[in-house]
Image (tube, rainbow, N blue to C red):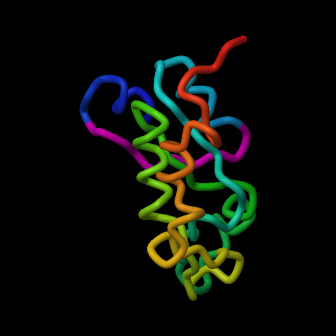
Amino acid sequence: SAAAVAGGLVPLATSTDGGGSIRIPSTLCGTFGYKPTRGLIPKPATRIGDNRMQPWLNVSYQGPTARCVKDAALYMHVCSGYSSLDPLSLPYKPDTDPENSFLRLVEDDKVFPKRLNV
């Protein structure tokens, strides 16, 4: 996903991370990868009776791979929220709670600085 975003094939992508699979490729490709808190992005439902992937689904998290932090915040704004198909998903409604919107946090200089000085 990080290579596709870095190469301009897609503007952003959904990636999964169980041990660095979002963050490490993003670092190497010059993109921004983010592993969100468990439950912010609901996981897809698996077929009933198909337990082969069940242990891995409990370890991996879905998150954005994007060209910049603002694009990743937009992804989180759209994809976060509760799903009845994922009982571990967290209730998040950015449209009804604009103060806690990912986009607002990225655009607010007091919350998220424009530059990081190390």
Quick one: 116 or 77, which is closer to the camera? Answer: 116
- Which residue occupies 63% across, 39% down? 110
Q: How many marks?
A: 0
Residue 68 quadrant: top left
- For the C terminus, the image quarter is top right
- Which residue occupies 44% across, 74% down? 95
Outermost residue, left side: 9
- Relative to 46, 57 lies left or right: right
- For the N terminus, the image quarter is top left
- Which residue occupies 48% across, 43% down? 107
| Residue 112 location (% of width, % of height) | 61, 38
- Magenta segment's dominant SS is strand
| Residue 114 location (% of width, % of height) | 53, 27
Quick one: 102 or 107, which is closer to the camera? Answer: 107
Magenta stretch bounds? 10-19
- Relative to 65, 27 lies left or right: right
| Residue 17 location (% of width, % of height) | 64, 45
Outermost residue, front side: 110
- Which residue occupies 51% across, 31% down? 32
Quick one: 16 or 89, which is closer to the camera? Answer: 89
Residue 88 quadrant: bottom right
Position of 75 relative to 109 (above/below)? below
Position of 72 relative to 95 (above/below)? above
| Residue 25 location (% of width, % of height) | 55, 26
Residue 44 painted magenta: no
- Relative to 90, 2 lies left or right: left
